[in-house]
Image (spheres, rainbow, N blue to C red):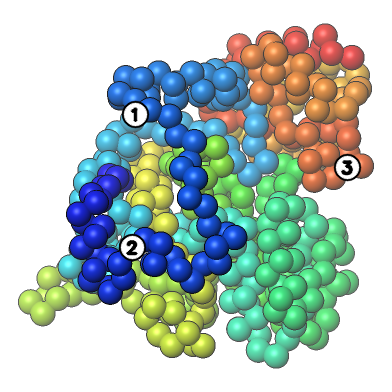
Amino acid sequence: MKFLPSSDDERAEMLAAIGVGSLEELFGDVPAEFRTTRKPPIGRPLSEIEVRRDLGSVSARNAHARSHAHFLGAGCYHHYVPAIADQTLYREEWLSSYTPYQPEISQGTLQSIFEWQTHLAILTGMEVSNASLYEGATALVEALLMASRLAKGRHRAVLSKNIHPEYLETVRTYFGNLHFEVVEVDDGDLAGACDSQTFAVAVQSPDFFGRVRGWKEARDAAATCGAMAIGVVAEAISLALLSPPGDAGLDIACGEARSLGVPMSYGAPALGFLACRDAHKRQMPGRLAGETVDAEGRRAFCLTLSTREQHIRREKATSNICTNQGLMALASNVYLSLMGKAGLRETAVQCASKSEYLKEKIAAVPGYAIATGGPTFNEFAVRGPKPAPEIVAALAEKGILAGVPLSTWFPEREREFLVAVTEMNTKAEMDVYAAELSRIR
């Protein structure tokens, strides 16, 4: 996005237009103790060459996926994005973060959204998808709020405690102010935690610790009390290999789609998604792009079911936080179109098979054990002989970003760390990883 500074004359013209004589007068409502006349500590103007050199030196101090062998995950995964995806994304007619407010004149944008929705509906096994959400955590919040509207009068949500801890924290934050009760239990206790006031049961697969979970547990638990069953997906690539929530009969699928063509970029921006059964679509947050015909009978696209506060009365809106993340959805749409069914499945197969290879290598290292039991997709927890932060710090010095210490969220799991493997990791990297790990005891 271009930076367009205003000149002194332009600022004077704008101030005159609103009837104030100076910037000080404009900000006169701000108490004096909160204002400063001191100039910010900005140095002399720099040339583009100097700016690139300075920022490059700052960037070089970071350890990242291009400088290190990368095995970090915990909700943000390192996947390959074809170069043509960026080239397509940067075309100026696409470069907008928002759905146009006169949408029907932007047929290309609407068609892209429509196709992205179609991709997500296929991947999740659902019938309808909306036009994206901020990220996985608030997508879960929106799914729960949607479920509460579908089960009017109920106030209790039952969530698996193995959902991403930051997703759970986001739910607690929202629901704490909405007077809903949130119950967090192990997957095996879901049914026992349900009662007549339960409006939703939610599980994640693969769960936060990398375990592939059965959607059936959520579906059966929800069925015992007439609640909505919600499937949460934090690693969207897994949908190309594992059974999706829709195929298991769940009512709503939500989660994070960043793995589908959106770079990690230090954790943001992300791309949430939400899909559901056709019968539930009128309680879906945000908006949908639909297919129609114009006055001459030609194929056309329109924005429909726009239940946002910009389009309808605030008290009738299904969401006040939902946005389109249009540019990220476009990136994901381009990625999915380029990869196709075969490419996406091949990516998922590589993730799973390489993960199994590294898991076996680590399990053979004396002093280390795989802490994640059962089948996994591309991520698993490792228990080491000393605190995990010490282990990952030692491997970082060897050029390996070894994993994410679980003590970040669970202080009692001091010696465990999450290891993620994707198609980007090579056999040589994994062999070096295991060899270096064997030297840390």
Q: Are marks 1 and 2 in contact (CB under 8 Å)?
A: no
**Who's the residue at 41% across and 50% down the image?**
328
Residue 386: x and y, percent? 90, 23
User: Are there few (<14), some (14-19), or many (20+) residues within 10 Å of tag 1?
Assistant: few
Horizontal side of residue 398 vs 281, given as left or right: right
Task: Return the disc, 3 or 2, that comes first in the chain's sequence.
Answer: 2
Q: Earlier in the sequence, mark 1 or mark 2?
A: 2
Amino acid under disc 2: Ser
Q: Depth check: 268 or 151 in front?
A: 268
> Mark 3 packing: few (<14 Cα in 10 Å), some, or many (20+)?
few
- State which tag comes first along the sequence, 1 or 3: 1
Which amino acid lies under the numbered mark 3 shown in the image of this protein?
A: Pro
**Residue 7 horizontal/vertical position (percent):** 23, 49
Which residue bears the numbered disc 2? 22
> Could you say which disc has been placed on residue 45 in the image?
1
Mark 3 lies on residue:
411
Q: Can I make out residue 436 in this image?
A: yes
Instruction: Indicate the amino acid at tag 1.
Output: Pro
Q: In the rendered structure, are the residues bearing label 1 and label 3 in contact, judged by CB atoms less than 8 Å apart?
A: no
Name the side, left or right, on which 274 lies relative to 433. left
* Residue shown at 27% from the left, 47% from the top: 5
Report how far apart the C-alphas of labels 1 and 2 lie in the structure: 26 Å
> Compared to 133, does 3 lie above or below?
above
Q: Give coordinates of residue 166: x percent, y percent.
A: 70, 53
Where disc 3 sits, the SS reads: loop
CA distance separating discs 1 and 3: 47 Å
- Vertical side of 307 occupied by 415: above or below: above
Does residue 370 show up?
no
Query: Which residue appears at 55% of the width and 63% of the height?
Result: 32
**Image point 62% across, 75% down: which residue?**
145
The residue at the far bottom in this view is 153
